[in-house]
Image: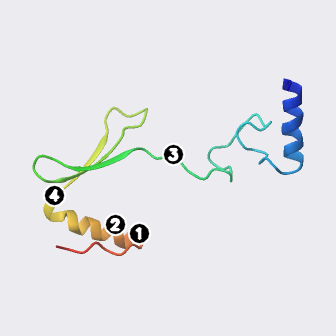
């Protein structure tokens, strides 16, 4: 298969709706990562959850390319349940049972 054959195959697939016209690799030269309806997952920085040496909850988000440090939120053990309850309420998830 030549490059011309491949181009014709893509053009034909676009015509019959087998390829989204703005899908990566389609014939368009630009792709709008902010607005295109074919995007199903947006970028998400990695998040870690762990306890530090004093038993506090640490929520740590990986720094982005333009940041010098990771972002850390430290919640004392005494306040962890209140945080979890608030997150569950905000997200419409049943709250975690207390021990």
Residue 94 versus residue 59 in the image, above or below? below
Residue 64 versus residue 34 in the image, above or below? above
Quarter-of-image position of residue 8: top right
Q: Are marks 2 and 4 in contact (CB under 8 Å)?
A: no
- Where residue 2 sits in the image (x, y, percent)? 86, 24
In the picture, measured across the screen, residue 48 lies left or right of residue 3, that is left
The disc, 3 or 2, on the residue closer to the chain's N-terminal end is: 3
Q: Residue furthest top?
A: 2
Q: Secondary structure at mark 2?
A: helix
**Residue placed under numbered mark 1 in the picture:** 91
Separation of residues labelled 2 and 4 (CA atoms): 16 Å
Q: Residues within 10 Å of mark 1 (few under 14, many from 20)?
A: few
- Where residue 62 sits in the image (x, y, percent)? 36, 40
Separation of residues labelled 3 and 2 (CA atoms): 21 Å
Q: Identify the residue shown where x is 73% and y is 36%.
A: 25
The disc, 1 or 3, on the residue closer to the chain's N-terminal end is: 3
Quarter of the figure that contains the C terminus: bottom left
Q: Secondary structure at mark 4?
A: loop
**Residue placed under numbered mark 2 in the picture:** 87
**Residue placed under numbered mark 3 in the picture:** 43
**Residue placed under numbered mark 4 in the picture:** 76
């Amino acid at each position: 298969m030549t490059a011309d054959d491949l181009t014709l195959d893509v053009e034909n697939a676009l015509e019959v709706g087998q390829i989204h016209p703005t899908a990566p690799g389609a014939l368009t030269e630009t792709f709008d990562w902010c607005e295109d309806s074919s995007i199903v997952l947006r970028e998400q920085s990695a998040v870690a959850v762990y306890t530090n040496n004093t038993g506090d909850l640490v929520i740590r988000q990986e720094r982005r390319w333009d940041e010098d440090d990771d972002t850390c939120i430290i919640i004392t053990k005494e306040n962890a349940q209140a945080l979890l309850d608030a997150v569950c309420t905000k997200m419409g998830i049943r709250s975690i049972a207390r021990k």
